[in-house]
Amino acid sequence: MEKIAEICGIEFFYIKNDTFKSDTVAVNFCDRLDRGRAYKNAVIPALLWRGCGDYPTSKALTVKCQELFGTVFMTDVGKRSELQHMLFMTDFLKDEYVKAFDNGDCVDEDFLSEESFKLLISVLTDPVTEKNAFSGKYFEQECTNLNNDIYAEKNDKRHYAMLRCCEIMFEGEAFAVSEIGYAGDSDSLTSEELYNYYRDYFLKKVPCKIFYCGKKRPDALVEM
């Protein structure tokens, strides 16, 4: 793994790999686990993937991914030591296997990687909003989904036992905090409050690391 750039606090890493027929870009936001931020950080990835400015619905995003030769997007939330990781990842066919055309003319050889990366950045920075807040419909649905995941933790006895063990053993420390937050954290949360948090803290203050795994150095993506 090679660190090839650091721009505005964003670190860009290159992992050379020509084994597979697809390349991967992973954008990781790494925040210190905190009881007051864990739930907000956990719901944001799912909320952002509901739509963006040019593709305001999940269906529109899915159709766009199919147009990009089956590009795959995913989000995830995890925990490493005392850090909470919010992952946004895209996996796309290597440019060398793609012949893309515009009005009969073959387009740039980096077409697919650049278009997939543009879509990922659009999802990250241009969410669906209404009156300076996240879409109320999307906000309520994703909070409900996350709350259901939190309640369902008790159904996995082994996982729940480990969770409670960590909470008891590391009480008062960051490691004790659950990476998906707690039931009831959404009760007083509003779509406007979460949007302000996303805009003023998540994008501006949470450390960001971008990993590119592929055959050639992603200089064009770094520039973008």
Image (tube, helix red, strand yellow):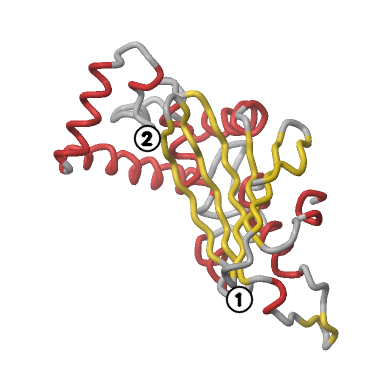
* Badge 2 element: loop
Residue 184 image point, x, y percent: 30, 27
Sequence order check, earlier mark of 1 and 2: 1
Q: Quadrant of residue 35?
A: top left
Q: Are marks 1 and 2 in contact (CB under 8 Å)?
A: no
Q: Residues within 10 Å of mark 1 (few under 14, many from 20)?
A: few
In the image, farthest residue toward the bottom: 104
Q: Which mark is residue 201?
A: none
Label 1 is placed on what type of residue?
Answer: Phe
* Badge 1 element: loop
Residue 212 image point, x, y percent: 65, 53
- Which residue has dot 1 on it? 69
Q: Quadrant of residue 110?
A: bottom right
Residue 82 image point, x, y percent: 44, 24
Residue 78 relative to residue 94: left or right = left
Q: Which mark is residue 180?
A: 2
Residue sitting at 82 percent across and 50 percent down?
223
Whole-number angstrom distance, CA of label 1 to CA of label 2: 32 Å
Q: Residues within 10 Å of mark 2 (few under 14, many from 20)?
A: many
Residue sitting at 45 percent across and 46 percent down?
76
